[in-house]
Image: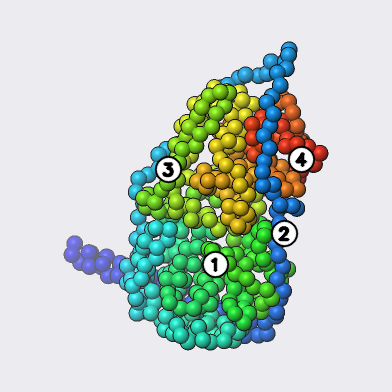
């Protein structure tokens, strides 16, 4: 028995040894493969860069939005009006109310240094990502490439940028990228969240260094992550340029190799490039554009940074109030969200906490209503629960708000109300919604199951009845007077 066990143990050890040899061979071949593409990329960077002129992204509206909004006149009484279908919603659909959010923050653990790096000297650091702290072991070599004073004083040009990539690419970055993807998965981050996470990594690793080096390291990590990003420079700065799945409005961009690359601000520090020097071509690993759609809401903060608010409105002479608790870390996360195409915002929904509070209040009420009554009820909620102010007056810039932001900020305009209203109608009433873009206004239209009187538009063979969440006290079928003669562009919110 002992002899058999010995043979089995020897065989197992031999198998482990063979596996380790195979694994080392695979890693060596992959490293050689990666080194080859890094060398080709560095050679490309060392070649002549071109100066390119900047272009300004188009405005979403042809004219500035109105600073005041009208109120609809009372609906006149109609004698002998044909009775409408009063079938309550509860007989047509089931309204899903989310479960209570899990208490406490998601635990994020950094892998032990020994498993992240082998034979590499590290220094201890930590990231603070929207009030979520986590340790981050950093290879000491990264900070030894340049001293803070040396980089801030050096002239930025294509040679120095190629040199930076050559030096940094010789350090094993797979542990950092694996850890970044682990954090991304734990916090349910989309591409925007990942860009912000990588920016936090770069700022942490190069704390105290010039912003140019931070941007270069962002470029390196995002390129290594597969994103189509470029770098450009002028005599003052280094700029990150992002390829994006959709248009980004009111945002500067460069056309490189037939594709738009946008200069996107990640925070209040606005970049102001004009013409810059940049390169043609890309690294072999860069194969995807940024996609800003939100499939899942990020899990941010530790649950302590919240703000309570109660929304009040009236409908058919009845007063309603909805208490909410808003995660302020989410508000910071969305504060500088790029002005991309509207379907991204119309399909974003909300996080579980405010959604649960709202739906528990709204769902039982509208479940007893017909479709038209429910839509009018939600119109009155969005029309009158918030004060009106344009983005320029509130933020000094154009901004589309996520539904949850509209619940948080003291003011909102036609974009924000249309986005919130569309979300509520789609999820609570179960009807399709389209956007209606006028020269300086955004409204919505709803595809009712039954005939509804009033103004309407057809899209792909379906009738959509106007429902304007900014036209105060207006019911479905009513268009703002100043836009009655204007034919709006219909925006399909699912594309």
Marks 4/1: CA–CA distance: 37 Å
Label 3: which residue? 308
Q: Is the C-beta separation of discs 2 and 1 under 8 Å?
A: no
Q: Secondary structure at mark 2?
A: loop
2 vs 4, front mark: 4
- Relative to 179, is 342 on the left or the right? right
Residue 235 lies, with reference to residue 466, above or below; the image says below
Q: Which residue appears at 71% of the width and 57% of the height?
A: 59
Task: Say which label, 2 or 1, has the lower sequence index.
Answer: 2
Marks 2/4: CA–CA distance: 22 Å
Marks 2/3: CA–CA distance: 37 Å
Q: Which residue appears at 38% of the width and 74% of the height?
A: 138
Tag on residue 269? 1
Q: Is the C-beta separation of discs 4 and 1 under 8 Å?
A: no
Q: Is residue 328 visible?
A: yes
- Relative to 16, is 217 on the left or the right? right
Marks 3/4: CA–CA distance: 37 Å
Coordinates of residue 356 in the picture (x, y in percent): 45, 37
Label 4: which residue? 483
Q: Which residue appears at 59% of the width and 73% of the height?
A: 239
Coordinates of residue 123 in the picture (x, y in percent): 34, 76
Say few, some or many: other residues with alpha carbon within 10 Å of mark 4 (under 14 / 14 to 19 / 20 or more): few
2 vs 1, front mark: 1
Marks 2/1: CA–CA distance: 21 Å
Q: Which residue appears at 75% of the width and 36% of the height?
A: 481
Residue 475 lies, with reference to residue 200, above or below; the image says above
Task: Say which label, 3 or 4, has the lower sequence index.
Answer: 3
Coordinates of residue 24 in the picture (x, y in percent): 41, 75
């Amino acid at each position: 028995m002992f002899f058999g066990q010995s043979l089995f143990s020897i065989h197992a050890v031999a198998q482990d040894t063979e596996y380790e040899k195979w694994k080392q061979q695979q890693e060596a071949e992959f490293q050689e493969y990666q080194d080859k593409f890094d060398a080709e990329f560095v050679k490309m960077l060392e070649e002549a860069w071109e100066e390119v002129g900047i272009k300004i992204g188009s405005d979403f509206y042809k004219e500035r939005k109105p600073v005041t909004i009208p109120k609809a006149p009372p609906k006149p009484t109609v004698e002998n009006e044909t009775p409408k279908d009063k079938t309550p919603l509860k007989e047509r659909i089931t309204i899903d109310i989310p479960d209570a959010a899990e208490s406490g923050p998601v635990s994020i653990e950094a892998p032990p240094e020994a498993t992240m790096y082998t034979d590499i000297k590290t220094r201890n650091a930590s990231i603070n990502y929207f009030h979520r702290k986590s340790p981050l072991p950093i290879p000491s070599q990264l900070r030894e490439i340049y001293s803070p004073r040396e980089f801030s004083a050096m002239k930025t040009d294509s040679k120095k940028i190629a040199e930076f990539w050559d030096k940094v690419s010789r350090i094993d970055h797979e542990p950092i990228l694996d850890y970044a993807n682990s954090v991304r998965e734990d916090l349910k981050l989309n591409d925007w969240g990942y860009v912000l996470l990588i920016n936090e990594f770069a700022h942490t690793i190069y704390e105290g260094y010039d912003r140019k080096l931070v941007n270069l390291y962002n470029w390196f990590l995002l390129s290594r992550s597969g994103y189509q990003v470029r770098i450009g420079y002028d005599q003052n700065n280094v700029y990150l340029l992002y390829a994006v799945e959709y248009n980004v409005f009111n945002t500067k961009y460069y056309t490189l190799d037939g594709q738009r690359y946008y200069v996107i601000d990640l925070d209040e520090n606005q970049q102001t490039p004009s013409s810059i020097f940049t390169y043609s071509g890309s690294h072999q690993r860069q194969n995807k554009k940024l996609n800003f759609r939100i499939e899942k809401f990020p899990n941010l903060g530790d649950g302590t940074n919240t703000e309570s608010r109660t929304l009040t409105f009236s409908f058919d002479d009845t007063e309603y109030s909805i208490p909410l608790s808003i995660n302020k870390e989410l508000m910071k996360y969305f504060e500088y969200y790029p002005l991309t195409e509207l379907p991204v915002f119309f399909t974003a929904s909300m996080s579980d906490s405010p959604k649960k509070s709202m739906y528990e209040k709204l769902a039982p009420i509208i479940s007893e209503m017909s479709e038209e009554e429910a839509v009018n009820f939600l119109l009155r909620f969005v029309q009158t629960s918030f004060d009106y102010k344009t983005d320029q007056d509130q933020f000094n810039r154009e901004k589309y708000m996520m539904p949850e932001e509209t619940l948080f900020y003291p003011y909102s305009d036609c974009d924000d109300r249309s986005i919130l209203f569309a979300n509520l109608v789609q999820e609570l009433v179960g009807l399709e919604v389209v956007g209606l873009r006028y020269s300086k206004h955004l409204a919505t239209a709803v595809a009712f199951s039954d005939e509804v009187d009033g103004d309407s538009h057809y899209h792909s063979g379906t009738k959509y009845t106007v429902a304007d969440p900014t036209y105060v006290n207006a019911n479905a079928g009513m268009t703002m007077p100043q836009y009655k003669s204007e034919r709006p562009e219909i925006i399909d919110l699912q594309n």
